[in-house]
Image (cartoon, rainbow, N blue to C red):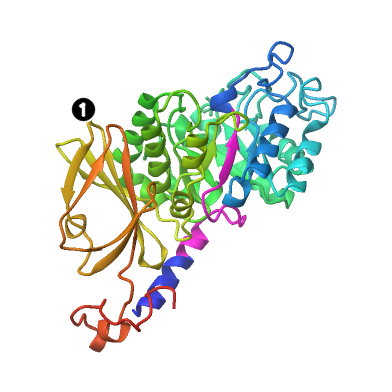
């Protein structure tokens, strides 16, 4: 098959397999309350940090005034502990009236007026993990309709207090119920996380058809140990997880904790780099009112975001795990580009890792390298040895552009590879045309 046809057909097959609500064709980006603010409902003693409409308004203001929104961070997501302990007289969920006096709908309008989106949290089960009213099978329709009436844009549907048999019914039903409201609502399913994240218990084909993203694994905490634990699980299981992801359907390794208390700056760059390689949703859980400028510049790194948001949506993988405790990760990107991350698990000193692009599976040619965190560029031939210096628990991240100029005619002469494809200055780049 002609290459262009092949690409078109494979793009189509991805498109038809994803949940058909048109949402989240690239990984969603924004802010989510849970990791940083948990279930703090003590507004009397902790008014700045308690789960209340003021917190979400503050974050919306920061997102829209501090340069986040333009970079794609548009979701402001409420997590657990937002609701009243009781449903209203019509059986509908209702926000805690003291902490959300304006109600959720008004909050959604606040977001929409600023070009932001509002996400909300529900739980399939008798109670949410924090003990608030859950959504049992008989409440799925009414809750989906309530969220749509409030004009929310995303639902994180947790799975505390339900069992595997119930979840098999509940998660697909909520997907249908959301679609039936006619409002496009991004659907985040915690289902696989409750079933161990792996086949045969978890059916990733089905998840891709009913959810836009899903939590596969345990909760992130504010520590480097927690990040490492998540990274290990995701890359140890990459053969299962990579094929599950694509436009409209994403694995979710949980929130970014950059800007909190647990990570050094090197570790923060590592989380950002690896989340970008994984095509992970980028939901920060931090305090945008007080975030340091270093943490902000990591989260606002344009190239890391550009890599994360690549429209082809192919999740990257770990390609090398060295005895020296350096690993290399790789993600293919549109326009024949790619991203590389050199990651050190060492604890001694910066390690000088020596390799060549051809050892990293790059084909013959010369490539343009952009170092994501230093902004330096260079040109590198596949066969040229190079050294990257990787800090303990840190990364070096590269955007690698395809050999600048491809000579398609020469490349495909007679349908066969003919010599070097990279040496004609006037030829066209491969996929863009
Ligand atoms: C679970 C989820 C977390 C968070 C809490 C809220 O643990 O995995 O992300 O939503 O519940 O109680």
Q: Residue 19 in magenta? A: yes
What is the quadrant of residue 84 in the picture? top right
Query: In the picture provided, is 47 more to the left or to the right than 206?
Result: right
Quadrant where the N terminus lies? bottom left
- Residue at 79% from the left image edge and 38% from the top image edge: 105
- Which residue is tagged 1? 348
Instruction: Specify the segment rendered in magenta.
Output: 13-33
Image location of residue 50, percent across then percent down: 67, 20
Residue 421 at x, y = what percent? 25, 78
State the residue lying farthest toward the top.
45
| Residue that extends furthest to the right in the rendered view of this protein | 89
Residue plotted at (66% across, 47% down): 185
The residue located at (75%, 29%) in the rendering is: 93
Task: From this view, report whether residue 246 is shown above or below residue 150.
Answer: below
In which quadrant of the rendered view does residue 349 lie? top left
- Is residue 344 left or right of 83 when viewed as pictured? left
162 and 356: which one is in front?
Answer: 356
Residue 251 visible to an observer of this rendering: yes
* Nearer to us in this view, 319 or 203: 319
Looking at the figure, which quarter contains the C terminus? bottom left
Q: Position of residue 188 (x, y in %)?
A: 56, 41
Q: Is residue 369 above or below residue 12?
A: above
Asked if residue 162 can be seen in this view, the reply is no
Instruction: Please tell me in which quarter of the rendered image ligand 1 is found.
Output: top right
x, y (%) of residue 377?
34, 58
Residue sitting at x 21%, y 55%:
360
Element on which disc 1 rests: loop
- 392 on left or right of 94: left
């Amino acid at each position: 098959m002609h290459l262009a046809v092949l690409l078109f057909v494979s793009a189509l097959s991805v498109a038809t397999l994803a949940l058909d609500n048109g949402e989240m064709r690239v990984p969603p980006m924004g802010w989510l309350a849970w990791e940083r603010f948990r279930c703090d409902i003590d507004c009397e003693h902790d008014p700045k940090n308690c789960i209340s409409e003021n917190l979400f308004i503050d974050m919306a203001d920061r997102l829209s005034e501090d340069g986040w929104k333009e970079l794609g961070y548009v979701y402001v997501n409420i997590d657990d502990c937002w609701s009243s302990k009781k449903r209203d007289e019509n059986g509908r969920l209702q926000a805690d009236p003291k902490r959300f006096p304006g109600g959720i709908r008004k909050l959604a309008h606040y977001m929409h007026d600023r070009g932001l989106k509002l996400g909300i949290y529900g739980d399939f089960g008798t109670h949410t993990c924090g003990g608030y009213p859950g959504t049992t099978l008989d409440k799925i329709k009414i809750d989906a309709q309530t969220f749509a009436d409030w004009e929310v844009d995303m639902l994180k549907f947790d799975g505390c207090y339900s069992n595997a048999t119930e979840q098999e019914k509940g998660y697909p039903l909520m997907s249908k119920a959301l679609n039936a409201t006619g409002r496009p609502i991004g659907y985040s399913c915690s289902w696989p996380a409750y079933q161990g994240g792996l086949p045969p218990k978890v059916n990733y084909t089905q998840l891709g058809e009913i959810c836009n993203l899903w939590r596969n694994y345990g909760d992130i905490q504010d520590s480097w140990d927690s990040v490492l634990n998540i990274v290990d699980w995701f890359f140890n299981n990459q053969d299962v997880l990579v094929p599950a992801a694509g436009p409209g359907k994403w694995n979710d390794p949980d929130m970014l904790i950059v800007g909190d208390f647990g990570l050094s700056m090197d570790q923060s760059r590592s989380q950002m780099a690896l989340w970008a390689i994984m095509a992970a949703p980028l939901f920060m859980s931090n305090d945008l009112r007080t975030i340091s400028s270093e943490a902000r510049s990591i989260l606002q790194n344009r190239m890391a975001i550009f890599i994360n948001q690549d429209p082809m949506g192919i999740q990257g993988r770990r390609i090398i795990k060295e005895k020296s405790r350096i690993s290399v990760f790789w993600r293919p990107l549109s326009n024949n580009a790619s991203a590389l991350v050199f990651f050190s698990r060492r604890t001694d000193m910066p390690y000088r890792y020596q390799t060549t692009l051809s050892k990293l599976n790059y084909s013959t040619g010369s490539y343009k390298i952009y170092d994501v965190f230093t902004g330096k560029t260079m040109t590198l031939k596949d066969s040229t040895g190079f050294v990257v210096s990787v800090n303990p628990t840190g990364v070096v991240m590269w955007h690698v552009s395809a050999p600048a100029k491809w000579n398609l005619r020469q490349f495909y002469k007679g349908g066969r590879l003919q010599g070097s494809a990279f040496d004609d200055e006037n030829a066209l780049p491969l996929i863009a045309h």
